[in-house]
């Protein structure tokens, strides 16, 4: 009985060895784990953080002159057109008065007109005296006029010629003064125009910094305008995926932390260099030491986008 049991034990041991050998011989070698580059190539969608900005940038409004704000014609949120007057200032220093300069110019123009008219009359009289002198000479040659009369006519003609020359010089001098006054008028008009702050571009008044009664220095910022009809998204792509991002790729836009689709877009610009995170991260905890590639994204529609809103940009890199 003991011999039989031992035989069973031997058979069981051999059977186990056979099974172990079969399993060991039939098992393939374990595959090596995929590399980081191989894993990145399997990614179909790349996430980027973006911020909505005016496509043409902010239009900053300032006055060319220092002065006091006396009138504000718009409010924040108003839509304005290019060239529209937004603010009016009173100069801190009294400028050359436009009305006075224009009145002086008009007076000089009247004087010039009268001088020209006087010159024409002098030329008519000169022609008459010349003809009278010629007639006297002809009569004198025929013994029909005295020498005294010829000399008197000649003297009268010469005196009138001096009058004509004097009027010509006067007109030239007055014309020079008139031109100088015209420069003064244009300067006064420009000074007055500089006290009007106009919109450089169309758009929405996003921020109005000036207040009535405020004294402002020249070139100080008074308002900001943005064209809300033309927006784009400045975004940053992590350096891991910079080679997968290209101009023309489709982008899905979402609010940060939301799954609601805001719209579709496409990439219009890809930066040529890697830079540090700085543009979109407001706190130190949001950024790390990784670098990014900056891109610009053009939304198909801007109706759901707000300027300065942070956007989750899902880029289709297939």
Image (cartoon, rainbow, N blue to C red):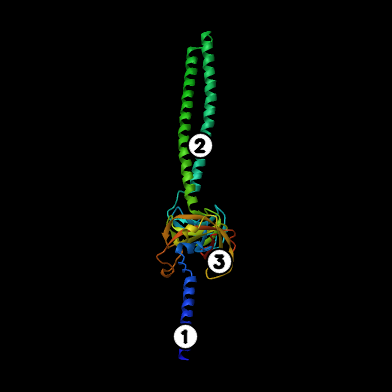
Secondary structure, mark 1, is helix
Residue farthest to the left? Answer: 289
Residue under the point 45% across and 50% down: 95
Say if 221 sits above or below 189 in the image: below
Name the image quarter holding residue 240. Answer: bottom left
Q: Nearer the viewer, mark 2 or mark 3?
A: 3
- Mark 3 residue crowding within 10 angstroms, few (<14) / some (14–19) / many (20+): some
Residue at numbered disc 3:
254
Secondary structure, mark 3, is strand
Of residues 99 and 199, the one nearer the viewer is 199
Q: How many marks?
A: 3
**How far separated are the C-alphas under marks 1 and 3?**
74 Å
Say if 56 sits above or below 11 in the image: above
Q: Nearer the viewer, mark 1 or mark 2?
A: 1
Residue at numbered disc 1:
7
Residue 168 in the image: state x and y as whole percent.
48, 29
Residue 5 in the image: state x and y as whole percent.
47, 88
**How far separated are the C-alphas under marks 1 and 2?**
145 Å
Of residues 26 and 182, the one nearer the viewer is 26
Residue farthest to the bottom? Answer: 1
Say if 64 sits above or below 40 in the image: above
Residue under the point 49% across and 39% down: 108
Residue under the point 46% across and 43% down: 184
Secondary structure, mark 2, is helix
Residue at numbered disc 2:
111
Say if 198 sits above or below 167 in the image: below
First-in-chain label (2 vs 3): 2
Residue farthest to the top? Answer: 142
Residue 213 at least partly seen: no
- Mark 2 residue crowding within 10 angstroms, few (<14) / some (14–19) / many (20+): some
Residue under the point 47% across and 49% down: 191
Of residues 80 and 100, the one nearer the viewer is 80
């Amino acid at each position: 009985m003991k011999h039989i049991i031992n035989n069973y034990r031997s058979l069981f041991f051999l059977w186990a060895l056979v099974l172990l050998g079969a399993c060991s011989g039939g098992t393939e070698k374990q595959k090596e784990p995929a590399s980081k580059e191989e894993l990145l190539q399997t990614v179909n969608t790349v996430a980027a953080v973006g911020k909505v900005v005016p496509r043409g940038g902010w239009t900053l409004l300032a006055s060319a002159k220092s002065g006091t704000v006396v009138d504000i014609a718009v409010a924040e949120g108003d839509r304005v057109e290019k060239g529209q007057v937004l603010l009016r200032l009173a100069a801190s220093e009294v400028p050359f008065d436009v009305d006075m300069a224009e009145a002086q110019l008009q007076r000089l123009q009247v004087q010039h007109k009268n001088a020209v008219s006087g010159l024409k009359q002098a030329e008519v009289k000169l022609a008459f005296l010349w003809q009278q002198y010629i007639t006297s000479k002809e009569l004198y040659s025929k013994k029909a006029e005295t020498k005294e009369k010829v000399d008197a006519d000649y003297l009268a003609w010469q005196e009138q010629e001096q009058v004509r020359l004097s009027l010509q010089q006067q007109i030239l001098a007055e014309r020079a003064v008139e031109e100088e006054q015209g420069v003064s008028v244009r300067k006064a008009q420009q000074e007055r125009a500089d006290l009007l702050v106009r919109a450089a571009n169309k758009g929405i008044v996003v921020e109005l910094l000036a207040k009535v009664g405020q004294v402002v220095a020249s070139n100080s910022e008074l308002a900001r305008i943005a064209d809300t009809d033309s927006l784009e998204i400045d975004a940053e792509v992590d350096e891991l995926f910079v080679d997968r991002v290209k101009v023309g790729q489709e982008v899905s836009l979402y609010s940060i932390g939301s799954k609601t689709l805001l719209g579709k877009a496409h990439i219009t610009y890809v930066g040529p260099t890697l830079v540090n995170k700085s543009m979109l991260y407001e706190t130190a905890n949001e950024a790390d030491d990784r670098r990014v590639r900056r891109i610009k994204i053009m939304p198909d529609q801007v109706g759901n986008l707000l300027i300065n809103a942070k956007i989750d940009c899902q880029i289709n890199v297939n």
